[in-house]
Image: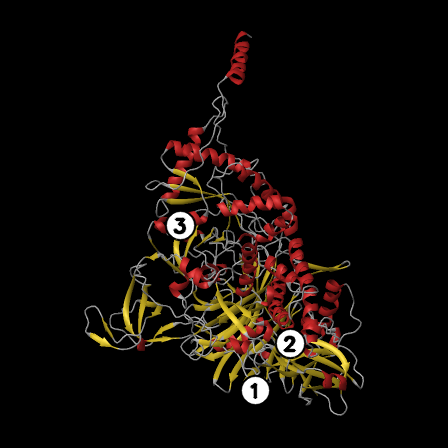
Amino acid sequence: MANQLLFLLVLFGVIFCGQSEFIVYNTSQSIVPGKLNVHLVAHTHDDVGWLKTVDQYYGACVQNVLDSLVSALLADKNRKFIYVEQAFFLRWWKDQSEAIKHVVKKFVSSGQLEFINGAMCMHDEAATHYIDMIDQTTMGHQFLKKEFGVTPRIGWQIDPFGHSAVQAYLLGAEVGFDSLFFGRIDYQDRAKRKIEKSLEVIWQGSKSLGSSAQIFAGAFPENYDPPAGFHFEVNDDSPIIQDNVNLFDYNVQDRVNDFVAAAVSQANITRTNHIMWTMGTDFKYQYANTWFRQMDKLIHYVNKDGRVNALYSTPSIYTDAKYAANESWPIKTDDFFPYADRVNAYWTGYFTSRPAVKYYVRVMSGYYLAARQLEYFRGRMDSGPNTDSLADALAIAQHHDGVSGTEKQHVANDYSKRLSIGYKEAEQLVASSLACLVESTSLEDCQNPVSKFQQCPLMNISYCPASEVDLVQGKNLVIVVYNSLGWSRNEVVRIPVNNEGVTVHDFEGKEIESQLLPQAEVYADLRNYYVQAYLGETPTKTPKYWLAFTVSVPPLGFSTYTVSAAKKTGPIVSSVYTYQNSEKTKFEVGQGNLKLRFSPNQEKFINYVNTRNLVEEQIEQSYIYYTGYNGTDDKEPQNSGAYVFRPNGTFPLKNERQVPLTVIRGPLLDEVHQQINPWIYQITRLHKEKEHVEVEFIVGPIPIEDGIGKEVVTKISTSMETNKMFYTDSNGRDFIKRIRDYRADWDLVVNQPIAGNYYPINLGIYMKDNKTEFSVLVDRSVGGSSLADGQIELMVHRRLLLDDSRGVAEALNETDCVLDDCRGLRIQGKTYFRIDPLGEGAKWRRTVGQEIYSPLLLAFSEQDEDIWINSHVLTYSGIDSNYSLPHNIAIITLQELENGKVLLRLAHLYEMRAKLTKPFESISTNLTFSYATLLPPTKELVLPGKATISHYRIFKVLFSVIQGAKGLSTEVWMDASALKIEEDKDLSVMATVELKKLFPRKEIKEVKEMNLSANQERAEMEKKRLVWKVEGSNGDDHVLRGGPIDPNELSAELAPMEIRTFIIYFDHASDQKVFVA
């Protein structure tokens, strides 16, 4: 008892009588030369939707972060913080008082708060199209420029599940970023890079733009969290720094030792004496002082200890320190796909997950591009409908848990809802803009045009009330067809109609050839179910036919077509034939150069013949499914899920032999209809004037009654000898060579031969041998591969019953419900394929790929026949009527800004590639060509150890060793005649766009070339660009780029793969206010 009393007295004295005083922490430390500098970067990673919707996250989490941040930064001027997602910051900013805004602006100007990345969201890099990536980045950058006058310097893609070449060179270097940081690379790649100290590299993502678009890039050692033991959110397990000596858990020296040990460990895998600690993670800093208090102490006590130097920093400060070190860095080319975070865990399933959402995003992207053009042609109004809501919805949907398909179902629904709301407003804008254009009205008077247009967003499931009207004599269905591309188009359009007694006339009043195709029964169920599911209404009747006719539409313009009740002759009704699968009779479809020959009894085999280029190939087209792996009971569990693709067996799907093939023939197009099985229906379609095959598929509901998830694939096999190689696009832009079971950066240990060879596809995939190229294009983001020579496969749908333990905690089991009728999701989509002689496939891939992204826009109006024709503009082009863009150039942005300025982006669609065409004596046979750089013209060149030779065009060529000594490279000088530089012999060249002819009704006053996101002038960006030293390079290469704009000629040059961004100012006094056809 006496001992207990003594203990209490001692404890009382320690608590109430011990020495304790307020400590002022020294947080002012900056970089110390010669020491290991630990850059503490305070950050939060705020998903713009994932487990919660964007609005739910804002209210529950992000608002707390930003509110808390203000007081935390005010408490110490040395504290720094970075913020990324402008979709959240913009919401918060609108809610703040002027006093708070003033404080935050001071944070920004002093460098305490730095905006990194600066886009609306941290977009995905696999399932996103490059135009969407540019648009959503531009939105964020424009907001920051307007409100704060800042231009973000650093790319910060810390959470996307793999990283694309387009992100590096286009959304990195071309935006003006000095560096790019990310968290997720393959676990095998990361392990090798740690050993080699190559987590930080110079990333040269474009073969065409070379060093002019390279960027310093860094992968974090272990993702984007702090080192273990240094998480300081409320309730985190990491020990705080307890520096009150009177308390039992005093641990300053222990924590300093932990800090130094972690810093030294990271320094051992990093070049230079600078390392970065990412102090934060998902939705942290909701009570910011819990982090800053501990970092204050760490900086104070670590620097007193003196072994390493700790400081508050940002990625910009870190980048500048790396640059100042004058280090030479290893080069990285291509991309960081696919990504696996451990054995048997390839994140390649999300390339296809939620295919309906992916399709909706892609369709809305193309529609937004067209709507902005029409908004410009009409003139942006101060009130009324505009494209802003659709822009915001598309920006948010690019999030790496959005279009990726890795969000919870209610969040996916929220993305779709936002897109639908945005579309509805943009639809009104498009309708009113077209009405103004067809009425030839002066801009000032075009507030309430008389013409009323309807559009049909559900045309893909044959639902179009506007075209299904019963026409009577004297009434016409007027169809305005708008083309958002810069070249004219001749295409077949199809609309559902109820009656066969109709004729079609063009804008000159001439009756044109048309074709009626019977509606397949499969559409009736699709139409009735999904119209009720999405619109809440039941169609009154089902159209009997598709009416097909050819339209001719000028660039950036429209043509008008009329459908009326037939007075004499009507369209040609397609002939319909059926073939039993047991029949041995062969049949042929195709009215033009391309023919397909089918043998019904051979089920999957097709003979492909092009009579123009004499290409002939035997094709096997089939469907299979992979069963999703159930790893629940494994020692290291790994299921197939929303993120991860882990197959557990391959199962071919045999055609339903009892269901005959239906063949439809007509003057414009032929179709072959096949019921593959009870839940897969396919239409193979050939257009008379086209030389490619269009394959429409309807897949689902995927059956799960056996309790097993399934991943459905369409597969096309040929006899081509492709030597393990195939090519996939990067975000719809460059094509990258893939080699099965191979990685250029490390010796791949193959543990998943299927999933580990899947890559993201946004535009297409192709393969080639020494004679031909086989190309497949897609209508949305999918995953695909070539798992055997001569074969291509695309995953079109997934339905899984288990979660893959990556955080979403929900199986990818999509269903739709109409009242109590719930069904698994059905997917309707298209692929397109074609075979060309070797070297001739690029033109088709690029041109048709652009047309798939920007389909013709149809608007309908029922009008009196004579009144319309005599009083409306029937054809119109927004550019000079005698001008068309070169076929290697696309307008990817035409948008009116404030005060009548216009944002214009032009994109070259082709790459500049180099190919060795004749041997060079100093090159050994085990070297493969990597890239070539065009050098200035010269007359003489002295080769080392060789005689002087004379020529005019020279290339410096880098060859990489792929056999023998790994990682070595050599540079040689070579006469240009030994190299063939092209993706296409005619179109991989410098192109010129005449700006005056793009704006014939306006007088251009000034043209400013901007960086990609249009927040700084290009020349200003180039002056600030950091030029990094690269191992093995002397930095003297010259890259082909378009020259400056001559103020008199006003012509813009574009080199292969170049995108140029301009802000154009007009002399509005000279504007023509009347639209002229």
Q: Is 1051 placed left or right of 468 in the picture?
A: left
Crowding at dot 3, Cα within 10 Å, few <14 / some 14-19 / many 20+, comes out as few
Residue 801 sits in which quadrant? bottom right
* Image x and y of residue 778, in percent: 56, 70
Element under disc 2: loop
Kind of residue sitting beneath label 2: Lys
Image height of 643 relative to 663, above or below: above
Task: Report the disc number at residue 320.
Answer: 3
Residue 1044 sits in which quadrant? bottom left
Q: Nearer the viewer, residue 867 or 336?
A: 867
Q: Nearer the viewer, residue 266 or 40?
A: 40
Which comes sooner in the sequence, label 1 or label 3?
3
Kind of residue sitting beneath label 1: Gly
Q: Is 316 placed left or right of 565 in the picture?
A: left
Element under disc 1: loop
- Residue pictured at 21% horizontal, 68% vertical: 944
Kind of residue sitting beneath label 3: Asp
Which comes sooner in the sequence, label 2 or label 1?
1
* Image x and y of residue 501, in percent: 76, 86
Element under disc 3: helix
Tally of numbered tags: 3
Q: Find disc 2 in the rendering and name its residue.
A: 1073
Image height of 504 relative to 1019, above or below: below
Tag in front: 2 or 3? 2
Residue 904 sits in which quadrant? bottom right
Q: Find disc 1 in the rendering and name its residue.
A: 592
On the question of residue 914 being in view, the answer is yes
For the residues labelled 2 and 1, the Cα–Cα distance comes to 44 Å
